[in-house]
Image (spheres, rainbow, N blue to C red):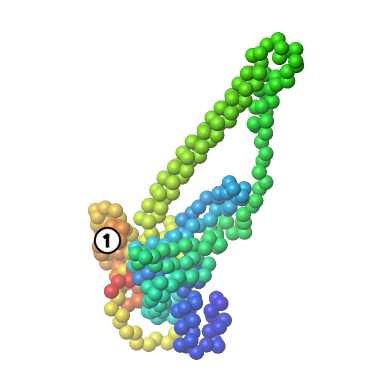
Amino acid sequence: MLIKSYASGFEPSYFLAYLRYMVLEHYISELLYRYNCVMVPELGAFLAQHKSAVLAQGSNTFYPPTKEISFNAQVRSNDGLLVSYISEAENITYEEALAQVSKTVKTWKTRLEAGNKLELATIGELWSNAHHKLQFQPYGKTNYLTSSFGLSSVVSSPVTREVLKEEVETLEEKIPFVFTPEKRAASSFRPYLKYAAIFLLAVSTGLTAFRFYKEKVNQQQLATEQVQDAVSKRIQEATFFDTAPMELPTLSLDVLSTPKKESGRVHHIVAGAFRFKKNAEKKMRQLKRRGYHSTYIGTNPHGLHMVTYDSYTDTDEALNALRSIKRTQSREAWLLSTK
């Protein structure tokens, strides 16, 4: 980590200030490679939506598959992912990492309320509009889809098709355009055949262009409906990780134990969230039969009923229990901290 290479030459206060202003967006960027949702407590969530390879018609450029980054200001809860990652990467406690994230978010909000744009390196820009709603514009320069690593855009030369020329040649074979004086004198009807052929060619070209336009409109409408369905599904799943997320590395450290101050927070290890409450109650009964102190903690911002394995007031106990559950029960378990 780049920040660690400078840490030895900084005083602690300067180091924490550097962490607060310069590094948080880099941690967000690193997590976007692994997860489709990275929540920043009290600010919002950065969402990554898979986008297939596309062809830009105007420039004939092929673009590889990628992740489109968006921002949802409605999801402001702390799922523990970002804070836990910073805690382990910087070798500090969970509470210290949470305090630094809170300070950074407070600073960002102050800048946004003052009308300034917030530039997040490699991610995008945040700003507040006239209605005090957060707007986000991704940079689009970084491809967060790991399966597309090493792929770049390719420009292809257009293929020239002489379809119109072939149609004209076919009409010329049926209706000759070359007349002799004798034939013109013999029949005054031939000149009209030339104009009729030109009219038929124009009508054929117009019908072809109209069919192409209708097909294009239908394709755009279908693509719009598919994107809207995908976005709705992604927002409903915004509080979850991938089916098989990459587990964060575990660091074994020998540290001196010091008295800890209770922060007044309760750390819940979430087993799942369900659309119907009866399914949540069924899951809670199953966990209790396994020996867990499972509880129902209400609904999340999307109206899903949440069930926990257990709840802790001590941060270290919660993190140790979370690691054990991920190893033995479910890799989809995650930590929710509430006051």
Residue 81, placed above or below residue 152: below
Where is residue 26 shown, x and y percent of the image?
A: 50, 71
Instruction: State the residue in front, 199 or 49.
Output: 199
Residue 320 visible in the current orientation: no
Residue at image coords 58%, 46%: 57
Residue at image coords 52%, 88%: 10
Residue 109, placed above or below residue 186: below
Number of callouts: 1
Instruction: State the residue in front, 209 or 306.
Output: 209
Where is residue 89 shown, x and y percent of the image?
A: 49, 75
Residue lying at the far top of the rendered structure: 186
> What residue is shown with label 1?
299
Q: Is residue 181 left or right of residue 245?
A: right
Report the quarter where the C terminus lies: bottom left
Where is residue 131 shown, x and y percent of the image?
A: 34, 64
Residue 275 visible in the current orientation: yes
Q: Is residue 3 left or right of residue 225?
A: right
Instruction: State the residue in front, 152 or 251.
Output: 152
Residue lying at the far bottom of the rendered structure: 11
